[in-house]
Image: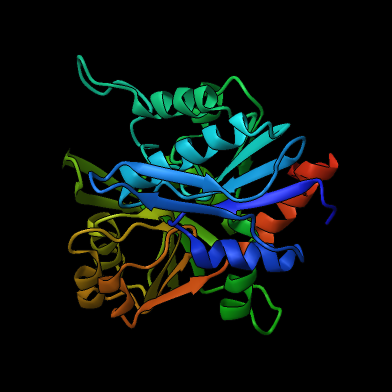
Amino acid sequence: MTSEIKIFAGNSNPDLAHQVAHILEMPLGDARVTRFSDGETMVEVGESVRGLHAFVLQSTCPPTNENLMEMLVMTDALKRASAEEITCVIPYYGYGRQDRKVAPRAPITAKLVADLLSAAGATRVISMELHAGQIQGFFNVPFDHLYAMPIMLADLKEQFCSDGQKPDDLVIVAPDAGGMERARAYAKRLHAGLGFIDKRRSGPNVAEVMNIVGDVDGKRAVIIDDMIDTAGTLTQAARAVMTQGASGVWAYATHGVLSGPAPERLTDSPLQEVVISDTIPLNEKAKTCSKIRVLSIAPLVAEAIRRVHTGESISTLFL
């Protein structure tokens, strides 16, 4: 890469940031993120960025508010240091589930975060697998939406289609009706069956499986989702699929939030394996779960950064 680009990283994804920088054959930018004694975020940029294209790589994952502030403060510091362009690369977009008013007097926090990024000085945003695609429209700056499908699909083919033949006993399952578009895209490329789970949610992070639409009897079922938070929905879906006669059940999800009782639920579930990406680093409890396997999105993020900088198409990554 040329000297006209610099990648800076906060504290949320250090391993991913170093992998991306390594792929692009360049060192990470010199920036220190520290805290004052009262907890305030402090960023010191240790090199000149005048006229450069700066990329700030930071997931707004737990601790969400701290990581969000780190990104905002770093973006502001780069703007005031006269960076020509500032692209915020957000592998996991926190607050993405608050994308609409679900009750009277409820906030739309996903829009608030978009406004904060613009106010801080972001001239472009790159993110991956938004919980709701319409969040792209919350921004008044260019937005590039990445998908983990190329990496997930390659692993699925290796695990379930190793002989190169059409997997007649494979069915892709969406955990809810909202995930049908994603599941259909995977099923089409794998030449697999398709199903989804009709569920009724009685409260936040609480889901009740109602019915399975599609044939899973005697088949290997792979549940595809965008994220796993408390794993309540996923583990109930896995049990429902097994109850309907599936020979085995696996799960693939881009974002492994894995909060609260998620690791224990996954361990106690019939899931044989749970495959996630490294948009969010595994927390300490999740590291103890033997069923979790992590795929790296670093090559995809690095290629997106390269294409943004050189003005090439990003959409062709997924065609």
Instruction: Using the image, determine if residue 162 lies above or below residue 238.
Output: below
**Residue at x 72% of width, y 67% of height:** 23
**Residue at x 45% of width, y 42% of height:** 93
Is residue 169 at all visible to an observer of this figure?
yes
In which quadrant of the rendered image does the N terminus lie? bottom right
Nearest the viewer among 209 and 202 is: 202
Q: How is the image coloured?
A: rainbow
Residue 6 location (% of width, % of height): 70, 50
Pick out the residue farthest to the left: 202
Residue 106, by quadrant, is top left
Circle count: 0
Residue 58 location (% of width, % of height): 50, 49
Pick out the residue farthest to the top: 105
Is residue 134 at all visible to an observer of this figure?
no
Say left or right for 76 vs 245. Answer: right
Say left or right for 110 vs 310. Answer: left
Say left or right for 264 vs 247. Answer: left
Nearest the viewer among 187 and 146 is: 146
Residue 89 location (% of width, % of height): 58, 45
Nearest the viewer among 169 and 50 is: 50
Residue 258 location (% of width, % of height): 30, 61
